[in-house]
Image (cartoon, rainbow, N blue to C red):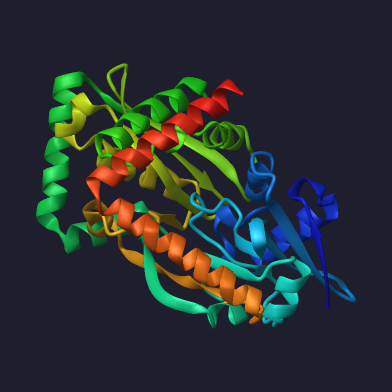
Amino acid sequence: MTVTVHTPDGLTARDLTAWCALQQSSPALASPFLSPQFARAVGRQRPSARVAVLSDGSGPVGYFPFERHRLGLGTPIGSGLCDAQGLIHAPGLDWDVQELLRACRLHLWRYDHLTADQGPFDSGVVRRSTSPVLDLAQGFEAYAARLSAKSRERTKQLQAKERRLRRTLGEIRLVFDDPSPASLDTLMRWKSAQYRAKGQVDLFASPSVAALLRDLHQTRSADCSGIPSTLYAGERPVAVHFGLRSRNVLQYWFPAYAPEAARFSPGILLLLKMAEAAAAQGIEYLDLGKGDERYKQEMKTGDRPLGEGWVSTGTAPAKLRHAQAASAQRMRAVVAGSPALRRIALKALDARHRAGRRS
């Protein structure tokens, strides 16, 4: 097996076709985050983005999207935003982790959303978790029946909120794939306000994150399309979501809602309407993304297994780089646990983002 490394935009048309074919060979690889379109969009915003192509005598048998940082630290492509990570590979493929990392000029590769069926990478998992999913394979009615059986009272509450929203603001309608740029602008404005109100890092203050979403908003492919969905009450948007879809997966990514409509749970109502529209288009599951938020646990009817861990070349530099990365992770946890330190860090990030926009 040979390994060559390219920038995402340096891949050939043959590579894109082969990559998509490998994705279709395994349900575990169906996420749009594992698509070449997502990798190329990230590559246009992050100079660190790379793709390793694994080939045997017959042609490409694997694609490994990653980012290469200082001192040989590797992360998944789109790290911090990507909810499915790993090597897109032919069924049954076995690969040598150390050989792959050396070819990528990495001492260490850390991951936090490793998908299933990852063979040698799976040996480095130190923590296992799941991503809640809405199983739509049998259609929306089957999902709704399972949800009602799981919590009939919660279902009644949502139905009552929908009726109150309709009486208060007007008829409810969903635009599942809203082509208007205004939908994305509304989402980022509401989401930024939500981040700040909760004392969290405002992702959209970063020009590169906003640019990535705008790029993906224009992406149209069977394996990765940006899907902005808007829930209207009357003529007024009350909830917006931007996610990615592949052939049979809808990835829930950035939801937001109008604060003045919060009492109607418009975000949950939007999720249900999206699930109904997605099932009608042949999407088999809606992936809510890793997290223990209450609504995810209430609305899910299944789980997708994930892994968090790291693999390395086993050399002294690799061990040093892992110690450095682990120390940085502990420091982030300390900052996250201290309101005072978090405020200082947020101010520093805001200043950096403002400086980036001026430059």
Quadrant where the image shows the N terminus: bottom right
Residue situated in front as seen by the camera: 30 or 53: 53
Percent coordinates x, y for residue 274 in the rendering: 38, 42
x 42%, y 56%: residue: 287
Q: How many marks?
A: 0
Residue situated in front as seen by the camera: 210 or 306: 210
Q: Which quarter of the figure has residue 241?
A: top left
Percent coordinates x, y for residue 170 in the rendering: 22, 20
**Taking the image as drawn, is residue 27 in sight?**
no
Residue projecting furthest to the top: 235
Residue situated in front as seen by the camera: 147 or 203: 203
Residue situated in front as seen by the camera: 98 or 72: 72
**Taking the image as drawn, is residue 22 in sight?**
yes
Q: Which quarter of the figure has residue 194?
A: top left
Is 243 placed left or right of 54 in the picture? Answer: left
Q: Is 106 above or below relative to 243? A: below
Percent coordinates x, y for residue 215 in the rendering: 61, 34
Residue projecting furthest to the right: 57
Is 77 placed left or right of 335 in the picture? Answer: right
Percent coordinates x, y for residue 328 in the rendering: 45, 60
Quadrant where the image shows the C terminus: top right
Is 240 placed left or right of 353 in the picture? Answer: left
Q: Is 207 above or below relative to 71? A: above
Is 316 placed left or right of 202 in the picture? Answer: right
x 77%, y 45%: residue: 9
